[in-house]
Image (cartoon, grey):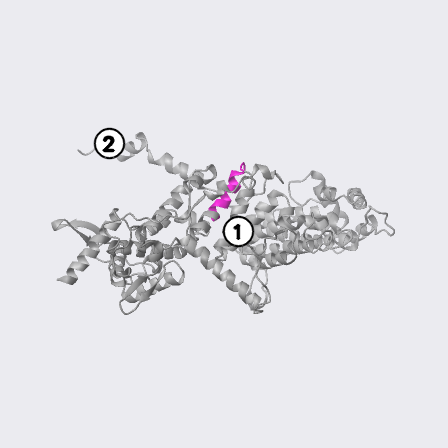
Amino acid sequence: MASTQPKTDVKSTEPKPEQPITEKKTAVLEEDDEFEDFPVDDWEAEDTEAAKGNNETKHLWEESWDDDDTSDDFSSQLKEELKKVEAAKNR
Amino acid sequence: MSLIAEFLGSIRGFIQTQNGDELRNWLLVEPNVAAHYYELGQQLRSSCPANSGNIEKLVEKHLPEEDDVPEGRGSPWPGFNSFMEEYLKYWRDVDFNDIVKLYGRLSDLLISCANALANPTYGIMLLQTSMSLSEALSKLVMSITKEPSLMAQIQGDMTGDEAGEKKSIVELAADIIQKIFTSCLTDRSSTRWQPPKGKKIAVYLFANLTLKLLFACDKSRLAVQMFTNLSTSGPALSLYPASQRVTFLYYLGRFNFDHGHYMRAHWCFEEAYRQCHPQFLKHRRQILIYWIPSNLLLARFPSQMLLSRPEAAGFADIFIPICAAIRTGNFVAFHQALNASRDWLWDRGLYLTLLYRLKPLVWRSFTRKTFLLTWEGAQGGDPNMMNTNRAAPALSLADLVTTATYVQKLLEGYVPTIAAGNTLTLIPPQGGQPKRLMPSEGLIFGNKQPDPDSMESIVAGLVYAGLLNGFIARQQKKFAVEGAKRKNGNAVLAGWPCPYESIMERFREDYEEELAAADAGETNEPPGEFEDVPGWVKMG
């Protein structure tokens, strides 16, 4: 059923769930991109991660991320394509 | 007249007591100063017009050079008096609304200050003033660069060197500040390994200011001389306050990133991040912006732990899709992921670097996936199982052409659809024509269709880079995996070793080669330690 309400009404009355999220995202991501001066000159080394053992920093990066899963959509498409080409060859 | 005399008299007092802090507090240049600076300017305009020589006379009168200066006391010196003349002229002639002229005057003033600073006996008194003037010029220059009309005006006024090479105002300012840096570097008050004294205290302050300017005008490569000088004779970074260390390492990391030295960039960013106090979220965030891409280019992904930190807010949305695309070898997803964050990445100079330099990793995953789908030993079971297949594991280049051709069509806008008989087929994009691709948007180059030669070339490149382990059997048109036996028959693991480890191994090999060459006397400069980063001076 076609809506009898003019588009502008719909826009102004119905809340847009999408908007707040994207706005928040851009607000968070907008930076000055300048490395500002620090408000203080120096601080205790004990207060930094450098003082704590290497344990924390070692878990910041993943080195083994290879994926053996071939059940996803992309892999299935490739599988099919390979089968097709193989079948065409054997004809 | 009296205000000028008073002013100079006070300055003389600070010189005599060697009070660098008060000199800096009095020798102000910005518009938001107390009214008496403007009064000073007025008096100078009425009593010391240009070319009258009156300023020179006043300075000579109120800042006389003294002989037989007692220990711990100071005296005006010729360089300082020249600087004071410039300073008074500055306030006589300044028009804060004429930015172009202001830039010229402030530059000249800083150059004069730098010359005075160079005095080996008394120059140290001007250290704080040099810093504040450098910061003022730096601030002015950065604000000018944000106004294109002002930039055009200034650039138009400037004449170029030979071959029409025009230096930008940012570069010129960086030049001046770098000279001050050099002056501090060569100060002999302390050695490289002692707590800094004299002008050496300010080495990294001026280095950081220079770097800030160079990066602001996209001329980071000009920092190479400064880093070289630091490596040669610079004091140990650890002797300096945390704020200077972190800032310096951030810029050194950026420099290495810009020059493709991702391992070094990682080492610098890692240390900057670790030494940065946890409460400075903005700074830690700024470091992460370049640290994460550095690691992507080393084939390491940011962990969930890192991405969930407060300073990493929003980064998961940017980087996880990119990582997912690399992991699955999915070129379509790769381009989509980059485009989704294109503006953000582009503004930070990351877009093109990631687009071009992550592609080999996507190719690696893609060839690995094709192998997983085609090699009998992997089919229908755990690829980590013992290889019961007698034939040596290999990836057929023809199979790679098949899968690559399919992906190329996806990139050209073909849509996979279920057709009659429940088969998957590719429907051409709307309009019937494949999308015309930019060179970088295609698998190989634009709309070029994958062919055996291109696939061989790509695989060869991956082998050469150490990402694939094996060789191309040209006759059989296959990539033959090597070392499967050593990996308990796991051909996938043998042929596609952990990329980060491969990259590290390649660095080590290069380093060992350099060592060997140095031992054999083939080079003059032996490499330092493996983890040395030129410019980062560590205690012996």
Output the chain of dot 2. A
Residue A8 within the magenta-colored segment of the rendering = no
SS class, disc 2: loop
SS class, disc 1: helix
Residue position for label 2 = A5
Viewer can see residue B427: no
Output the chain of dot 1. B
Residue A84 horizontal/vertical position (percent): 17, 57
**Residue extending farthest right:** B68
Q: Are marks 2 and 1 in contact (CB under 8 Å)?
A: no
The number of numbered badges drawn on the structure is 2
Q: Nearer the viewer, residue A41 or B495?
A: B495
Which corner quadrant of the image does residue A35 belong to?
top right
Residue position for label 1 = B253
Residue B363 horizontal/vertical position (percent): 34, 57
Three-letter amino acid code of the residue under disc 2: Gln
Labels 2 and 1 in the same subunit: no
Which corner quadrant of the image does residue B486 belong to?
bottom left
Give the magenta part as a residue range.
B278-290
Q: Is residue B138 left or right of residue B468?
A: right
Q: Could you classify mark 2 by the number of other residues whose Cα lies within 10 Å: few (under 14), some (14-19), or many (20 or more)?
A: few
Q: Nearer the viewer, residue B143 or B174?
A: B174
On screen, B34 above or below B250?
above
Q: Nearer the viewer, residue B403 or B222?
A: B403
Give the numbered dot on residue B468: none
**Residue extending farthest top:** A13
Screen quadrant of the N terminus of chain B: top right
